Image (cartoon, rainbow, N blue to C red):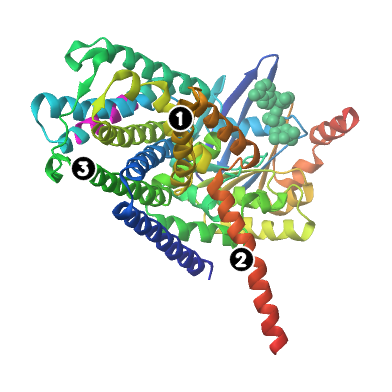
Amino acid sequence: MTALLEVKNLTKAFVGLVAVNDVSFSLQAGRITALIGPNGAGKTTCFNLVAGALRPTAGQVLFEGCSLEREPPEAVCRMGIARTFQIVRPMKDMSVLENAMVGAFSWTTNVKEARDKAYESLENVGLAGKANARTDQLTLPDRKMLEMAKALSTRPKLLLLDEVMAGLRPTEAAGVVGVLHRLAESGLTILLVEHVMRIVMEVASTVVVLHHGVKIAEGKPSEVVADPAVLESYLGAGFHA
Amino acid sequence: MQRTSDQASDTKRWGAGALVFAALAMVGGMSNAYVISLLTIVLLFTFLGQSWNLMLGIGGQLSIGHALFVGIGAYAVAILNIKYGVTPWIGLLLGAVIAGFVGAVLAWLSFRFEVRGIYFALLTIAAAEFARIMFGGWDYVGGMQGLFYQAPSGTMDLGMLRGDARFYYFVALALAAIGVAGTELISRSYWGYVWRAMRDDDEAARALGVRTFRHKVLVVSISAATAAIGGGVLGLVQGAIFPDSIMGMAISVDVLIGPVVGGLGTAFGPLVGSMAAIPLHHAMGALGDSLGLPGLNSVAYGAVLILVVWFLPDGIWPAIVRLYGAIQLPARGRISQLRKAEE
Ligand SMILES: Nc1ncnc2c1ncn2[C@@H]1O[C@H](COP(=O)(O)OP(=O)(O)OP(=O)(O)O)[C@@H](O)[C@H]1O
Ligand SMILES: [Mg+2]
């Protein structure tokens, strides 16, 4: 099986703390992988390193064999990696539809084509009915779905989702889980940061666990939840919180 | 269904625009010389406001030194025409190319070295002031004494862009119409979408594959080139060019007052804003002269700016659109109620 993305010994040091410490993992094409860990474990930093928003202190990111560490975010996106932001970032003076169109302009300059793609992305996440709304009229869960639609419009091969289901009601989350399965079936590779373990168990074929920037476990969801080191990291975090 | 309602409002908007410009054309046919010359300036600054609006209102890049580009255009036309008898059409083209290049270099250098936002705006002022002083000391272009066009003979000559006040009114009207339509078309084109995305959130736009660096350089360059075209015509209308007037800070302020007062990022805002602010500026200037209060026009300008920013932060035009919507909605509601009552 071929790895679409390979992360090798990835390290990011901020002043006074190493947010990502010598982390390696790889993503199989067409699979959903979950990246989990307690608050502050380094998950979002990992996303930023892969997406070109941050430069690694050390290590490598290989996508389809190409090295990404020196590429700016727009180039990473154009190579086929789209990401959502944990703290949503809608373009506030553009409509929901227009927001979803922006990503399509990474592969077309045709406005009609971009609009069609945007409708398709919005339909995928259940937002098509709000296409003409302003973004400040959306609820937070809807804004998270808009983040996903924006990313989908770029026609990614790899989708990085940072807590897109946070704040969703269980029925809504189940809907999104269905969407993720469908996307994966159509060949999309997904790396997902998610706190709700029930969802992780349901969608992910592989789970990578970070704690204090270090990878402490990797494997099938059922194996990972039984791992003493994982349990301890979560309980430990619970005690400190 | 939503798409067709989009098209309906498109037709409405274009129709409304056409009506406004038809009305302005009729005004040009009827009014006296004073009104004509005042409205010519209003319309020229509508066009210049559109150029500035493209850069900030759509592209998200602030310039407070647009006089630089206005001046480049004015000098390009004047030098070629006055010294070599070349038609202003060539001067306009050349001025646009030079200003576009200067704008691109300025933007490239500053964004390359992470000079952004307000610091970029300060750089535009510095560049404009530098150019003003340079032209003032340059004998070839008349230094501080400036350049003078020959007094118009009165016969209209489209090839040489010469004619009476009414002729220039229609030239300015055409430019303003091109400005409004151009803004509308650009903001709904590929460029408009990616520019508005980078205006709203640069980092999020980049994450969606928008190459914001080159688009910022592009929007500054296009804004500069169009400002030069407006400047070239402004010079012809005024009949003379001096570095202090055509490249001074006052021009940079005049350029931005229309869109700020009228509505940033909108197609009609600069027209509405110029219509409101420039006649007031002139009236207060005249009143100030007759009362012996020379600064009255600037005070009025300042007051209008403060009032608009305070009460209508989006500008006058979006407020009109909102008001129109507010009047429409209850009316529709009432009609549907009446229908229900009939059933
Ligand atoms: N730009 C930065 N400068 C300094 N420290 C940072 C920066 N970004 C993140 N950190 C720190 O790095 C650590 C990892 O942060 P990160 O956001 O990656 O965690 P996370 O796993 O996404 O957490 P959460 O579940 O809360 O989203 C945290 O301690 C955080 O404070
Ligand atoms: Mg995070």
Q: What residue type is labelled 2?
A: Gln
Gap in angstroms between the C-alphas marked 1 and 2: 39 Å
Gap in angstroms between the C-alphas marked 3 and 2: 43 Å
Magenta-tinted stretch: B93-103
Q: Would you call the spot at circle 2 few (<14 residues within 10 Å), some (14-19), or many (20 or more)? A: few
Find residue B261 and report its horizontal and vertical position in percent: 52, 39
**Total marks in image:** 3
Q: In this view, does B241 lie to the left or right of A222?
A: left
Q: Mark 1 points at which residue?
A: B285
**Residue at horizontal 32%, vertical 41%?**
B37
Task: Name the chain letter of the residue that bears numbered label 1.
Answer: B
Asked if residue B2 shows in the view, the reply is yes
SS at circle 2: helix
Q: Which amino acid does label 1 sit on?
A: Gly
Find residue B185 and report its horizontal and vertical position in percent: 38, 52
Q: Mark 3 points at which residue?
A: B164
Task: Name the chain letter of the residue that bears numbered label 3.
Answer: B
